[in-house]
Amino acid sequence: MMLEKEIREMLSEYPDIIYGFTDISYCAYQESYRSALVLAVPYGEQLTPADYTEERFEQGIQTAKSRLEAIALEVEQILQKHQVKYWLPPVAQENETELRALFSFKTAAARAGIGWFGKNDVIITERYGPRVRLSAILIDEIFAYGQPITAGRCPENCTKCIDICPCKALKNQQWSIEKDRSEIIDYQKCNRMRSAFIKILGRKNACGLCLAACPFGCSEQKS
């Protein structure tokens, strides 16, 4: 299909990013869109606990965010040229009670074969570990889909993210597609800790310690 070919050729110009397509028949938007293109851009710095600071982690997030926006704009231009219906779901969560986004980038990433949910409830990629920022574009077209990942691949005896969590929100549970996130993480506890910094920082604490501690991706980040 010409549309898919153009998108893949454009994305090949960014060899450091990870991407994949998935059908979205599992979600509430299946009647309006048939697929999602999921993008994973590495953070500006691939931090480990040895060099982690909250400020550096937040800067890495913002660098990846800017790149994602620019890449997504290029995809949009291709979709507009082909007159295909699409939508970029917002990153922000709907509210501070449920703490869920309108469309889960993480679920789509696992279904596209990009990675799995770690014991920290963050998508883990083989290349960068969890040190990526995700985005997705819902598209009313069919593509060649990635192979879904339905179970965690973290070593059973690895507790690095659990041990480093400052608010002890992680429950040392291996993920599977059937599990609810509440079985893996106490999201409210994590959110309360991060929100306590709003008055000081003017935003929530980025807190990426559980990402920095992950051993996956360490060889890539130091190469």
Image (spheres, rainbow, N blue to C red):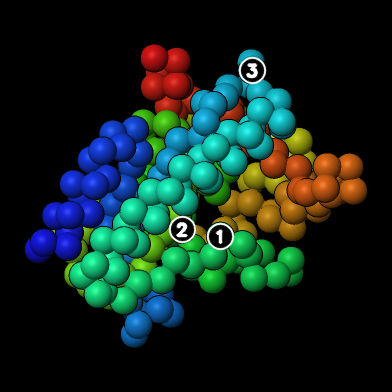
Marks 1 and 2: CB-CB under 8 Å? yes
Q: Within the image, what quadrant is residue 178 found in?
A: bottom left
Q: Which mark is residue 91?
A: 1
Mark 2, residue position:
105
- Which amino acid lies under the numbered mark 2 shown in the image of this protein? Phe
Left or right: residue 122 compared with residue 188: left
Mark found first going from the N terminus, 3 or 2: 3
Left or right: residue 161 compared with residue 207: left
Specify few, some or many for label 2: CA neighbours under 10 Å numbering under 14, 14-19, or 20 or more: many
Observer able to see residue 221: yes
Q: Pick the residue in front: 29 or 183.
A: 29
Q: Within the image, what quadrant is residue 32 found in?
A: bottom left
Please provide percent x and percent y for residue 61.
58, 39
Secondary element at image label 3: loop
Observer able to see residue 35: no
Q: Quadrant of the N terminus?
A: bottom left
Q: CA distance from mark 1 to mark 3?
A: 27 Å
Secondary element at image label 2: helix
Q: CA distance from mark 1 to mark 2?
A: 8 Å
Please provide percent x and percent y for residue 154.
44, 36
Please provide percent x and percent y for residue 55.
71, 31
Q: Quadrant of the C terminus?
A: top left
Mark 3, residue position:
51
Vertical position of residue 104 compared to residue 200: above or below:
below
Q: Residue at x 68, y 55 (%)?
A: 187
Q: Pick the residue in front: 31 or 200.
A: 200
Q: CA distance from mark 3 to mark 2?
A: 28 Å
